Amino acid sequence: MEQSIPLLLLALIKLVTSLYYEGSGYAADESYNNEVHIEQRPSTPFLDYRAPRWCYDFNIQDGEAACYSPRGGTYRSTLGTRCRLSCDQGYRLLGQSSVQCLPSRRWSGNAYCRRIYKNLCHVLPALPHGSYHCSDGVSEGSRCDYTCASGYQIEGDRSRICMEDGLWSGAEPVCVDVDPPKIQCPTSRVKFAEPEKLTAVVYWGRPQVKDTADGVITRVTLRGPEPGSEFPEGEHVIRYTAYDQAHNRASCKFIVKVQVRRCPILSPPLHGYITCSSAGNNYGANCEYLCEGGYERQGPASRVCLFSQQWAGTPATCTRMKINVNMNSAGGFIDQFFEKQRLLIISAPSSSDRYYRLQSSALQSANCGFEQRQVVVVELVGEEPNEVGRVREQQLSHDLIEQIRQALHMTRSYFNMVLLDKYGVDRERYRDPIGSDEIFTYIDTYLLSSQEMTQLEAKRENCE
């Protein structure tokens, strides 16, 4: 009886133990030496979710466990409850981010929050022509935003973040000069042509150029004439172009206008013509009145175009030249033709001389040609006391005839001719009669000026 009491007590302990572990998923087994062992059994087919506290309450230091129970929000540790884990700011979660209350009355995992000790990044270098602002200095997670100065544009990353490895994200940006220079050209101008010219010399100052980045700019190119150049009549566009160091470009332009003051065109006088300097009727031009052979100018020799666009003086006229045969010397007689007429002096022993007759008939048909070439014919015919000298219808005195013969070394003995130019120079002598074409060819080739040649070409057909 005494030995059965311990056996009964042992049986009672086993019963209580088996009941306890039956609810927790564990079973008690008796070994051969009557020791109690705990072995894990498979989950029981029936779980009592109604137990309000199946697992211990899950708490995480420096963090939060957001738990959701199948039985409702007021339960935090019933069987099947799930908890999502998170850490406070400045801490990092280590372990599982979600756990579940298992039938074993344990959570499916564990986690804890560890303080984050921030790494430091290096100080960002200064940004030329710009700046940056950081949210938390050089600490991990700090964000630095870049901005550029006025006139510059950022190229690259606009912001960088200090990362966990102590390096900045992205790459360092640059501020690019995108603002073109400011250039101001001189004002447009009007200039009058200088006297006797169709051009004007125009001066101006260099344009002013400034740039927000480079300050005063001297790299300026000019398209057009330089200041101080001579500009012809009309409008001229002068363009300047400036470049800054970033090759941004700016241009400006202005107009140089040259005007020519002109007078009304002068009309040439009857039996005369006009030669003018410069363009003929521009300010400062000088126009000279000239008369054809056998005509003399009456009035001013020239007129000038004034700035008021009016001609100075009055117009001149051309009247037939009056030949003075009442001279006391051959020199005086010839001088009156100076720069006006050429002289062709014919000498013959008599009016019946064969050579004289041939020459007279040849010259009679050439009167128009002589007039156009400004040639006056003087005839000395016969011997004393019946010698005759004449110019057109006027008679020369015997004394003047004798002086002309002596001055020009002309004989009465035979036919001969002398051709004098407008300056009284003996240019050609003839011993035999000669045709008018040969005389005209010589005059046209050697004696006519360019102006006379132009006049001759314009009136050549009048003799035909």
Image (spheres, grey):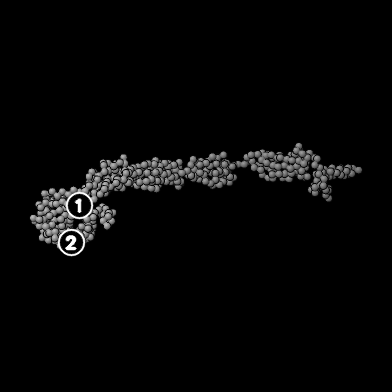
Q: Can you give x and y, in whole percent of width and height, for residue 195 in the image? A: 29, 44
Q: Is residue 266 left or right of residue 143?
A: left
Residue 358 numbered mark, or none:
2
Q: Is residue 285 visible?
A: yes
- Asked which secondary structure carries label 1, the reply is loop
Quadrant of the rendering where the C terminus is positioned: bottom left
Q: Give the position of the N terminus as an image quadrant.
A: top right
Q: Which mark is residue 311?
A: none
Amino acid of disc 1: Gln
The percent coordinates of residue 341 (x first, y second) are: 20, 52
* Residue at 75% in and 42% down: 81
Which of discs 2 and 1 lies nearer the camera? The answer is 2
Above or below, 246 relative to 73: below
Q: Give the percent coordinates (x, y) of residue 32.
A: 83, 50
Q: Is residue 449 above or below residue 188?
A: below
Label 1, residues with CA under 10 Å away: few <14, some 14-19, many ≥20: many
Type of the residue with mark 2: Leu
* Residue for point 25% across, 47% down: 289
Can residue 194 be seen at all in this image of the molecule? no
Quarter-of-image position of residue 78: top right
Which of these two is toward me, 116 or 410?
A: 410
Q: Is residue 287 left or right of residue 430?
A: right
Residue highlighted by disc 1 = 341
Q: Residue at x 44, y 42 (%)?
A: 182
